[in-house]
Amino acid sequence: MPSLRALLRAELAVQWWWLKNNRVMLLLSFAWPYMAVLVLLGMGYAYGSVENMAERLGVDEPLVYLMAASMVAFAASGIIDNASGVAQWHRWLGTLPYVYASPHRFPVYLVVSGFAGSLFIAVTDLAAMLPGALLAGGPRASAGLMAVFAVMILASLPLVGIAATAALLSLLAREEGNVLSFLNPLLLLLSGVFYPVEVLPRLLQALSALVPVRYVVEAARVASSFSGGPMRAVVVASYYLAAMIVVYNTLSAHAVAALERGARRRGVL
């Protein structure tokens, strides 16, 4: 049976060849993070000022923070999109039974596919944003962006279990689009990617503590201010994310097993 490393390498190759054969999409993947930053800056100028936004966020380089936040948003939503999207794609093509009969268990395939897609998105966004961060904030801003990237990869590990659970749930319910349209906005809402979590109601603030992406956002905030350096941002976020990796993936393993049994009984797999 091929190793997980070989499976991950194959999924990354699929991502690369798909983009290589879609040159326009490749160019857009480098432009999307900047488009998100421009939209947010435009909204900021329309409703206030960049200085006011920087004060409320507690950062000294709001432009660098928005670059990091855009990278976080695309990578966080990408892991669920890729895991559920590949399940949906195979069901529509009629190849789902063949993928399910492959050497690796289907949930493992979903996890690796989701992680590979998220990793590819994060690397692409990092490559796109590094020149902008260097121009906006110098070497310190670039180092901060790379620190946020490291934390984002760590945060992907508890998210892979959630992604696999969402993918099987979408197959079982045959409502892939509705599952995704609910989970991704909720994930971004509770993480405080583009605004402070403190503006949310108290219940949602409490729930946001359970979202791994929130700690990546906190790392981005620390890396974009003078309250600490990039390494401090990585260390602080790593403590929370290490606990989430154990707890979330343990719970997700049980949920995935139950959903897989349900999908087999209904003939979905």
Image (spheres, grey):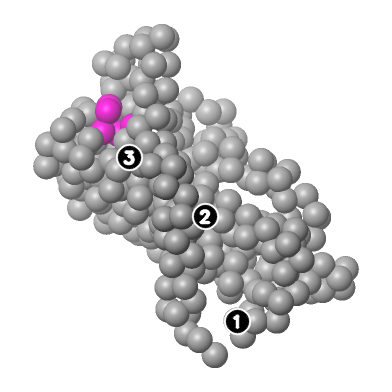
Disc 2 from disc 1: Cα separation: 19 Å
Could you tell me the amino acid type at mark 2?
Answer: Ile
Q: Secondary structure at mark 1?
A: loop
Q: Mark 1 is on which residue type?
A: His
Question: The magenta stretch spans which residues?
Answer: 62-66
Indicate the quadrant where residue 135 lies: top left
What is the distance, in whole Å, between disc 3 and disc 1 at their CAs? 35 Å
Q: In the image, residue 147 lies at what x, y percent?
A: 25, 51
Circle 1 sits on which residue?
A: 104
Residue visible at 67% across and 74% down? Answer: 99
The percent coordinates of residue 65 (x first, y second) are 30, 34
Residue 110 in which image quadrant: bottom right
Res 246 seen here: no
Q: In the rendered view, would you say 40 is above or below 9? A: above
> Mark 3 and mark 2 in contact (Cβ < 8 Å)?
no
Percent coordinates x, y for residue 61 in the rendering: 22, 29
Q: Is residue 7 above or below residue 165?
A: below
User: The residue under label 3 is which amino acid type?
Assistant: Ala
Q: Residue at x 41, y 30 (%)?
A: 36
Name the residue that disc number 3 marks.
68
Give the side of residue 173 with respect to residue 208, left or right: right
**Percent x, y of residue 112:** 52, 69
Which of the numbered marks, if any, corresponds to residue 79?
2
Check the picture and name the quadrant holding the N terminus. Answer: bottom right
